Image (cartoon, rainbow, N blue to C red):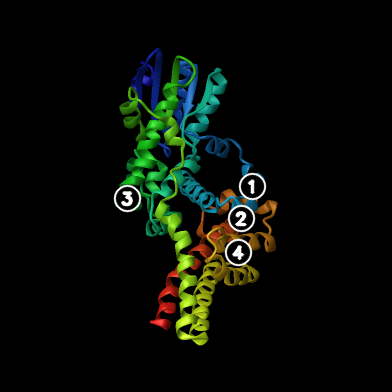
């Protein structure tokens, strides 16, 4: 009896002229690593599909990928949160893997290596992680985004509480789904993006992969969805697109600065220069102090903290610039990451202390926490300013 017939985790599917050996794996299971190798060697497929996108493929195959990172480019392209999210998720997966003796993505690495040894084509079947995270981010409101951010940070310490009995549940879930379990409960749209959409994406990529005999290696949590969508129409281009930013967000981005200018102007006009000056003072103090506090929380350099304090009252009135970008670039300039920081990144992301110690991740934290402080500063300043003329 072949591994495919005997394991109970391999499902033989047929789509047009293709025979697909859908292999469900657990990302924290040694048995899955062995199963993947056996199935590929026994079935001798034309193509091996793996649940990886291009960026995650490089992450598991290129150990020195961090050394090529341009942190300044990341900030300028407004990708700080996406990179920080990726690092937090990588940290969670690596800590789980270390605890149970399996390298992160080892079953995917084994699938790739065995495919190359047997002459099979390797086909990347998952959607880009940045697209998935961006679609998730844009589907959430402000408070939900804050909850997501703290949930990701809290995931750094969650692995210490995971016991053997929790592994059975994790074997049936996606890593993203495990980390965001609490957020997912109150926001069903997150499950749609993290699981349902990726089930469709994986299904389309697998059934259109080159060759007639295909082994597909995916997390066990995606198997039912792939089976469900196998003979359904799938618009893969729609799944790859970023949804437009919400109209309300775009309106508020301009409306809030205009309202603040109008409020200050009203203070000067109706209550005189003393009231107007007092309102400006509240605006500068609330934005500057809370943005600076955010930088302090990230253990930023004193010059970075100063830049956050100065920039926040100004950038909060400019929809095109964020205080976190200014402070992040300042931190990158005064504490330039060295090769050592890039080399140590895979280990430093395993602990909260490491995230704050490493110069690369500290820069990302400076961007995020400064922006959070500036945002809270705006909400604090508005009622204080209104009270002056109320």
Looking at the image, residue 228 sits to the left or right of residue 176; the answer is: left
Q: Residue at x 45, y 68 (%)?
A: 259
Image quarter where the N terminus lies is top left
State which tag comes first along the sequence, 2 or 3. 3
Distance from Cα at disc 4 to Cα at disc 1: 19 Å
Q: Secondary structure at mark 1?
A: loop
State which tag comes first along the sequence, 4 or 1. 1
Q: Which mark is residue 360?
A: 2
Residue pointed to by mark 3: 187
Residues 34 and 135: in front is: 135
Q: Nearer the viewer, mark 4 or mark 2?
A: 4
Residue pointed to by mark 4: 327
Residues 249 and 10: in front is: 249
Q: Is residue 142 visible?
A: yes
Residue pointed to by mark 1: 69
Q: Nearer the viewer, mark 3 or mark 1?
A: 3
């Amino acid at each position: 009896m072949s591994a495919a017939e005997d394991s109970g985790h391999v499902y033989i599917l047929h789509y047009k002229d293709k025979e697909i050996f859908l292999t469900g794996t657990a990302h924290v299971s040694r048995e899955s690593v062995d199963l993947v190798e056996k199935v590929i060697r026994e079935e001798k497929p034309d193509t091996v599909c793996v649940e990886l996108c291009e960026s995650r493929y490089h992450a598991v195959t290129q150990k020195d990928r961090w050394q090529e990172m341009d942190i300044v480019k990341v900030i300028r392209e407004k990708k700080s949160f996406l990179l920080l999210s990726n690092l937090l998720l990588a940290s969670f997966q690596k800590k789980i893997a270390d605890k149970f003796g399996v390298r992160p993505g080892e079953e995917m690495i084994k699938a790739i290596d065995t495919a190359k040894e047997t002459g099979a084509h390797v086909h990347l079947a998952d959607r880009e992680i940045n697209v998935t995270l961006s679609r998730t981010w844009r589907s959430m409101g402000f408070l939900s985004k804050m909850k997501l951010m703290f949930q990701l940070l809290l995931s750094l310490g969650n692995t210490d509480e995971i016991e053997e009995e929790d592994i059975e549940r994790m074997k049936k879930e996606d890593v993203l789904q495990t980390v965001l379990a609490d957020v997912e409960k109150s926001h069903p749209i997150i499950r749609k993006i993290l699981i349902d959409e990726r089930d469709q994406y994986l299904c389309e990529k697998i059934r259109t992969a080159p060759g007639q005999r295909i082994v597909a290696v995916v997390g066990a949590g995606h198997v039912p969805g792939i089976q469900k969508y196998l003979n359904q129409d799938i618009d893969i281009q729609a799944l790859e697109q970023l949804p437009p930013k919400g109209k309300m967000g775009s309106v508020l981005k301009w409306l809030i600065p205009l309202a603040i200018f109008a409020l200050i102007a009203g203070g000067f006009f109706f209550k005189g220069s003393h009231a107007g000056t007092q309102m400006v003072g509240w605006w500068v103090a609330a934005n500057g102090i809370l943005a600076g506090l955010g930088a302090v929380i990230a253990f930023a350099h004193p010059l970075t903290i100063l830049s956050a304090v100065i920039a926040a009252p100004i950038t909060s009135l400019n929809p095109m610039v964020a205080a976190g970008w200014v402070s992040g670039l300042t931190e990158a300039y005064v504490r330039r990451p060295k090769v050592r920081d890039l080399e140590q990144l895979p280990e430093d992301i395993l602990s909260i202390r490491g995230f704050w110690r490493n110069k690369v991740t500290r820069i990302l934290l400076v961007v995020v926490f400064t922006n959070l402080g500036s945002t809270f500063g705006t909400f604090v300043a508005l009622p204080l300013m209104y009270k002056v003329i109320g």
